[in-house]
Structures are given as structure tokens and as C-alpha cells.
């Protein structure tokens, strides 16, 4: 049996969900504007995909959901407080990071159009 000296993957940075949550809480304790990428960098990740990988693990599901909710809550407050100047940027963040969808509803009023009858005469 051969042993691989350097495995082709990096071992997980966090194996204990309590330490993961503590690191998230450190980020939020700083205050200011929270960003998803800022949280990932604070956790020591080099990409957002690593965070999503932790979200798939049962032990980390609650911690990752709470961290995302804190950032989402801040974006949502920014939308409703009326002080923000970049509504489109907030909507972009909510759509791409938190699964929000923008939908347009169209209401029709009045009578529906009746089908038209065409007479064809064959000679």
C-alpha cells in the first residue's frame, strides 16, 4: 500500500463548529458594513465556494445559516431605511448571495379580446 505524502486536497480549516461560529462572531463584532466576501476572508478562505462547502456539512449548517442571515439582514435594512444611495447594488447582493428573486406582476383589466373569425371563399 502506498501512502501519499502530499494529498491533492487541503484538509478542512475548521473541524469544530463552535470554533467556526466563534470566528464568524469575531467578524460581526467589528461592526460596520458586513459583506459575504469579507466574512470569507476573515474565516481564512480564499474563495466563497469554501463557505458553501461548509454549508453542506450537517455540523456547520446552523452556523453558516446564521452568518448568512446576519449579512442578509443588514442588506435588507439598507433597502428599507431609505438612506442608501445604491439600491441596485443591494439588490444585486441579495439576488446573487441570498437567493432573492425580483418578479414583476402584470394585471390586465378590461374585456378580453374576442377571437376574430376569418371567412375564406374557395373558388
Image (spheres, rainbow, N blue to C red):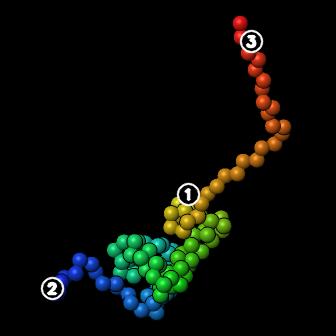
3 or 1: tag closer to the N-terminus: 1
SS at circle 3: loop
Foreground disc of the pair 2, 1 = 2
The alpha-carbon separation of the residues under discs 2 and 3 comes to 87 Å
User: Alpha-carbon neighbours of circle 3 within 10 Å: few (<14), some, or many (≥20)?
Assistant: few
**Residue 18 rendering spot, x and y as whole percentages:** 46, 93
2 or 3: tag closer to the N-terminus: 2
> Farthest right residue?
111
Task: Assign the N terminus to one quadrant of the image.
Answer: bottom left
The alpha-carbon separation of the residues under discs 3 and 1 comes to 58 Å
Q: Mark 1 points at which residue?
A: 88
Q: Which residue is drawn at 73% across and 15% down?
A: 120
- Vertical comparison of 123 with 55: above or below: above
Q: Which residue is drawn at 65% across and 64% down?
A: 82
Q: Mark 3 points at which residue?
A: 121
Foreground disc of the pair 2, 3 = 3
> Quadrant location of residue 6?
bottom left
SS at circle 1: helix
Amino acid at each position: 500500500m502506498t501512502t501519499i505524502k502530499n494529498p491533492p486536497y487541503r484538509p478542512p480549516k475548521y473541524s469544530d463548529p463552535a470554533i467556526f461560529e466563534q470566528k464568524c462572531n469575531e467578524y460581526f463584532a467589528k461592526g460596520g458594513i458586513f459583506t459575504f466576501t469579507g466574512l470569507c476572508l476573515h474565516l481564512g478562505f480564499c474563495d466563497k465556494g469554501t463557505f458553501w462547502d461548509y454549508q453542506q456539512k450537517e455540523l456547520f449548517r446552523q452556523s453558516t445559516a446564521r452568518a448568512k442571515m446576519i449579512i442578509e439582514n443588514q442588506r435588507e435594512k439598507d433597502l428599507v431605511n431609505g438612506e442608501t444611495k445604491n439600491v441596485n447594488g443591494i439588490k444585486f447582493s441579495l439576488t446573487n448571495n441570498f437567493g432573492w428573486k425580483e418578479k414583476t406582476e402584470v394585471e390586465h383589466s378590461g374585456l378580453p379580446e374576442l377571437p376574430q373569425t376569418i371567412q375564406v371563399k374557395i373558388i
